[in-house]
């Protein structure tokens, strides 16, 4: 199988077809699904047949091209556990470790196993697994790979988890602003490569959209006042895709001295939020009349 070639040619998820097949098999048989990804075939792995689950062994050209979005998507929609061989190239191992750590933080804890060589893999593949609930693959593979990762994490984590803390260097998170230090120079807005930061309509405050922030740190580096800081994490509520106001206007709104700022997220349960979320693929599957009760972080 030439997964990597497919991944190079397009931005499509390279594991999509495998996920679809695993999802269909699981629905038909009720048996748990195991995915084993490797660069160098461990002796005997291809012949391994688990007594308790369907095992799908897949050769991959470069394992470091399989990122957290692919792995989260596979766990959310078809596979119950993934065995992932450690990258053979030493320079790729740290990247792979970070991707796996991200998967574990976003609902894959205990369901992704790194292995180095064949030792112990056969025994583990024969272990009894409980099948996890699965979501149809195409429901989660919407928008960008970041959108897919976010939707998959929302499916994997309990609905009571509104915010997932993530390790340092994770490409998801929010920014902290020290209002007392900020001199409103707007340098952070001009340097932000993803438009996660912008100015509110009257330019009175900074507006921020968490789902767009890659935690690149450019805003922190350019800030002459050292007023910005990064906070890795993932907001799993509908508010992640809405602008929230950083800065002085938010303080005023909180104290009741001013109305909601232009560009601010609407109130939980408001008609505007319902409309916005219904038009947003990630959240259109959820019942927003009840979701904010459990997933709202109170961040807006
Ligand atoms: S956070 Fe820093 S860079 Fe951004 S407007 Fe304030 S002072 Fe300027
Ligand atoms: S960390 Fe990067 S993407 Fe996020 S707000 Fe700052 S400049 Fe924009």
Image (cartoon, rainbow, N blue to C red):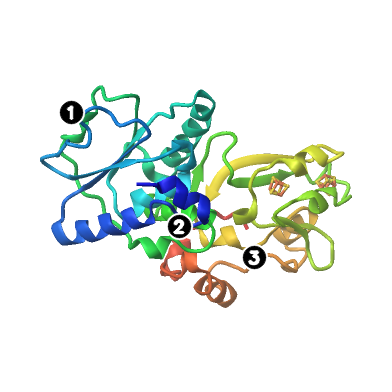
The answer to whether residue 162 is seen in the rendering is: no
Q: Secondary structure at mark 1?
A: helix
How far is disc 1 from disc 2 in space, using C-alphas? 33 Å
Q: Is residue 132 above or below residue 100?
A: below
Crowding around mark 1 (Cα neighbors within 10 Å: few <14, some 14 to 19, many 20+) is few
Residue behind label 1 places its C-beta within 8 angstroms of ligand 2: no
The one nearer the camera, 181 or 148, is 148
The front one of 12 and 205 is 12
Mark 2 or 3: in front is 2
Mark 3 element type: loop
Q: CA distance from mark 2 to mark 3?
A: 20 Å
- The answer to whether residue 139 is seen in the rendering is yes
Mark 2 and mark 3 in contact? Answer it, CB < 8 Å.
no
Sequence-wise, the earlier of marks 1 and 3 is 1
Q: Which label number is shown at residue 265?
A: 3
Residue name at image x 58 percent, y 33 percent: 168
* Percent position of residue 229, x then y: 71, 39
Of circles 1 and 2, which is in front? 1
Tell me what residue is drawn at x 32 percent, y 53 percent: 18
Q: Residue at x 13, y 42 (%)?
A: 52
Residue located 17% across and 36% down the image? 47
Which residue, given by chain and number where applicable, does mark 2 sit on?
151
């Amino acid at each position: 199988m030439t997964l990597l070639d497919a991944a190079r040619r397009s931005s499509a998820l390279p594991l999509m077809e495998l996920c679809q097949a695993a999802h269909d098999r699981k629905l038909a048989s009720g048996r748990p699904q195991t995915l084993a990804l490797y660069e160098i075939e461990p002796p005997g792995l291809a012949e391994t047949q688990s007594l308790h689950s369907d095992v799908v062994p897949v050769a991959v050209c470069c394992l470091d091209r399989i990122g957290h979005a692919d792995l989260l998507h596979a766990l959310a929609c078809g596979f119950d556990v993934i065995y992932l061989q450690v990258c053979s190239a030493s320079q790729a191992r740290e990247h792979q470790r970070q991707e796996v750590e991200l998967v574990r933080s976003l609902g894959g804890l205990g369901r992704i196993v790194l292995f180095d060589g064949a030792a112990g893999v056969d025994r583990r593949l024969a272990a009894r697994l409980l099948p996890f609930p699965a979501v149809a693959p195409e429901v989660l593979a919407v928008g960008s790979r970041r959108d897919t990762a976010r939707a998959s994490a929302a499916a994997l984590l309990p609905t009571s988890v509104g915010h997932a803390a993530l390790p340092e260097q994770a490409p998801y998170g929010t920014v902290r602003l020290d209002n007392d230090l900020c001199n409103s120079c707007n340098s952070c807005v001009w340097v932000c490569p993803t438009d996660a930061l912008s100015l509110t309509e009257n330019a009175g405050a900074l507006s921020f959209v968490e789902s767009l922030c890659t935690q690149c740190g450019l805003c922190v580096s350019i800030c002459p006042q050292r007023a910005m800081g990064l906070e890795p994490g993932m907001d799993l509520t509908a508010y992640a895709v809405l602008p929230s106001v950083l800065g002085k206007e938010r303080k005023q709104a909180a104290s009741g001295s001013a109305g909601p700022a232009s560009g601010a997220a609407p109130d939980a349960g408001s008609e505007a939020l319902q409309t916005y979320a219904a038009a947003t693929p990630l959240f259109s599957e959820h019942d927003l009349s009840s979701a904010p009760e459990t997933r709202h972080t109170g961040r807006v």
